[in-house]
Image (spheres, helix red, strand yellow):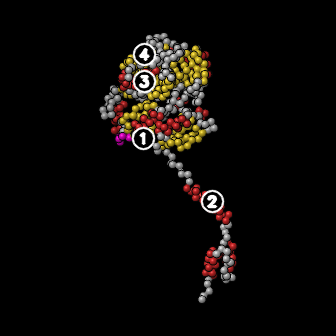
Amino acid sequence: MAKPSQSDQLDAALTALLANPHAAPPPVDATVAPLVRIADDLRDLPRPAFRSRLRGEIDRKASMATDVVAAPPARQTATAYLCVRDAAAAIEFYARAFGAVELYRLTDPGGRIGHAELRIGQSTIMLSDEFPDYGALSPQAIGGSPVKIHLQVDDVDAFARRAVAAGASLTRPVEDQFYGERSGKVADPFGLTWILSMRTEEVAPTEMQRRFDALMRGQGAGAAPTADAPRRTRPIPEGFHTVTPYLAVREAEELIGFVEQAFGAQGKVLGTGSQGGIHGEYRIGDSMVMIGGGKAFSGTPMPTAIHLYVHDADAVYQRAIAAGATSIKPPTDMDYGDREGSVRDLAGNHWYIATNKATGLAPPGLRTITPSLHPRGADQVVDFLKRAFAAQELALHRSTTGTILHAKVRIGDSVVEMGEAHGQCQPMPTKFFLYVDDADAWYQRAIEAGATSLASPADQPYGARVAALADSSGNQWYVATPIEHAAA
């Protein structure tokens, strides 16, 4: 028999060593013996401790492989970045109203949100709290926002109802639009506007332009345009809100000086009012107030009550006193979270000067100026505002006997508050300008809700179509839609 080759001897020896780890190495040629001894020395490796560490490392890496953090989705090319007052409350609202899902948030040591990201449908939005030192200001701080966010949804009517139920205000009803979508508009409690929309038809750009031209001339989408029809513009003039209080007083000139000195109001007298005297428009913080009357005023004075939110209620209260106001109540910490005092100015207007302790200015959803009514029969006024102007009830607190102690309703992007007349808070019927998209339609709706007509809708020389009404408590509502006439 032929002698096994060196390779065969080595293979046989290694097989024997692996089969019986405790046996002595088998006999082999001298040329193969050194390799067999090396194999014999290595057959106990790796040692148990090393094997244990190796197994643990393999198991750990296997576990990591099953828990890999997914790569972030590709970023949108353009992403809306919102700056709001009270970002935490905004995140909660967007979850309720729009079904937003919070992806993450970053907070500073004081709890303010420096950056957060939410997903709504297939899109991401970013938002943060206000950081004035870095130029990050909310709509409340700058008097509104020129930017609107457009949400494409599957069922716009249901989506709008959900948003309103969560606290949004419907500022334009959901309707079929000329550009092939059904859409409406809501204002959130943080000063931002959202256009809710769903596609209903595909419209070619040329047809869309034809419909737009017809609409701008006051015609239906299918009608031929005419040259002399009124051209309607945005329902609310730049810088204004849906509801603007109008202080009509004999002491109009003196009142203007007072609001400038006490509240830092900025504005000017624009001309003569419809009942003689002057007409001025003044900005205080993020809100507007109209002031009219004066020595030549032939109408009935209508001083009012206003909730005025400022950064330092104590300091502004003292400025108001120095400017000639009479104290009603010095600033006091209130159980609803405000520090508030009140004064009566030289024309009889009541100013509730307040600072919300949580925000340092106004509570979420309110502006610098909020009209405050003290009617007899507050229930009837709330009901009228709902039926006439689609007001939405935000808060309603009653006494044990059922009397309304405090109520807040939203009309468009504005809030009106009221409480039943009592003590020093007696009825002060107020004059309001109410900006709407169609003065004729809202005038008719208010009449059907029980309002008394003071003037039918008519185009005014100052560029608005205006109607005037009075409610059962004597408040006057000037329902207005800005217009401009197309060139002949």
Image mark for residue 274: 4
| Label 2 or label 3, whichever comes before in sequence order | 2
- Where the C terminus falls, by quadrant? top left
Q: CA distance from mark 1 to mark 4?
A: 45 Å
Would you say the residues marked 2 and 4 are in contact, meaning their CB atoms lie under 8 Å apart? Answer: no
Residue 230, can we see it? yes
- What residue is shown at x 58% (from left), y 58% (from top)? 62
Read off the residue under disc 2. Answer: 57
Relative side of 468 to 286, left or right: left
Q: Magenta residues?
A: 199-204
> Please, is residue 145 above or below residue 29 in the view?
above
| Label 1 or label 2, whichever comes before in sequence order | 2
Mark 4 closeness class: few <14, some 14–19, many ≥20 residues within 10 Å: some
Magenta stretch encompasses residue 239: no
> Please, is residue 38 above or below residue 196 in the view?
below
Q: CA distance from mark 2 to mark 3?
A: 72 Å
Relative side of 28 to 373, left or right: right
Q: What's the residue type where badge 1 is placed? A: Val
Q: What's the residue type where badge 3 is placed? A: Asp
Where residue 20 appears, as percent x and y from the top left, is 64, 75
Q: What's the residue type where badge 2 is placed? A: Glu
Read off the residue under disc 1. Answer: 153
| Label 2 or label 4, whichever comes before in sequence order | 2
Q: Tell me the mark number nearer the camera, choosing from 2 and 4.
A: 2
Q: Tell me the mark number nearer the camera, choosing from 4 and 3.
A: 3
Q: Tell me the mark number nearer the camera, choosing from 1 and 4.
A: 1
| Label 4 or label 3, whichever comes before in sequence order | 4
